[in-house]
Image (cartoon, rainbow, N blue to C red):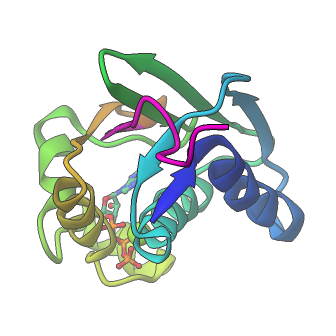
């Protein structure tokens, strides 16, 4: 399905912004232009829901989550940046493994199965994109993902 990513992404962020119970501030840096992506919207919703839930789960009281989108050669690049507890450097890539959770004690308290990001990685890869993370332990985490975009919406000539 051909989806305009900005509208799609904003709608997901809105849903979290309206329902969140924590005192966490959302900041958006999204382009004004339209970018069309050929995606399964239900699957991409699942991916983004998991990334935002993780960011909220690990955000401190009064923290900020930034949602940024930029464009580079044929791909949109999405960044979801939190100020949470972060992930030790040696474990950053492992968070995309099935059932991997950084710290058992911490994770038990937070709930979840450790499958969210493994599924996200499969789905982003299936859409021709990449997903990765950067983190500073104690300072915060950024999840990045890319998706190829189409030059036009594939619609009829006007
Ligand atoms: P599920 O998503 O299945 O409910 P989960 O959230 O624990 O469970 P993932 O979303 O796959 O699983 O994340 C894997 C692990 O990576 C988490 O348990 C957590 O330890 C770590 N993690 C993921 N996102 C963040 C983040 N934004 N900040 C800190 N740690 C994170
Ligand atoms: Mg999760």
Q: Is residue 105 above or below residue 153?
A: below
Q: In the shown orientation, is residue 82 left or right of residue 18?
A: left
Residue visible at 46% across and 82% down in the picture = 111
Q: In the shown orientation, is residue 80 left or right of residue 63?
A: left
The N terminus sits in image quarter? bottom left
Q: Is residue 121 magenta?
A: no
Q: Is residue 147 magenta?
A: yes
> Which of these two is toward me, 83 or 118?
118
Q: In the shown orientation, is residue 142 left or right of residue 81?
A: left
Q: Is residue 20 above or below residue 149?
A: below
**x then y, percent, for residue 32:** 73, 23
**x then y, percent, for residue 35:** 55, 34
Secondary structure mainly formed by the magenta segment: loop
Residue visible at 19% across and 48% down in the picture = 128
> Which of these two is toward me, 142 or 137?
142
The C terminus sits in image quarter? top right
In magenta, the rendered stretch is 143-158
């Amino acid at each position: 399905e051909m989806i305009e990513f900005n509208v799609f992404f904003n709608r997901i962020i809105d849903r979290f912004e309206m329902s969140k119970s924590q005192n966490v501030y959302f900041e958006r840096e999204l382009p004004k232009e339209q970018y069309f992506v050929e995606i399964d919207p239900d699957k991409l919703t699942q991916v983004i829901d998991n990334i935002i839930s993780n960011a909220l789960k690990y955000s401190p009281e009064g923290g900020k989550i930034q949602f940024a989108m930029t464009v580079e050669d044929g791909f949109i690049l999405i960044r979801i940046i939190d100020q949470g507890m972060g992930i030790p450097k040696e474990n950053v890539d492992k968070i995309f493994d099935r059932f991997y959770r950084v710290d058992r004690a911490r994770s038990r308290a937070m709930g979840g199965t450790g499958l969210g990001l493994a599924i996200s990685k499969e789905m982003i890869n299936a859409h021709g994109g990449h997903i990765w993370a950067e983190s500073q332990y104690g300072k915060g985490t950024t999840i990045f993902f890319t998706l190829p975009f189409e030059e036009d919406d594939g619609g009829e000539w006007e």
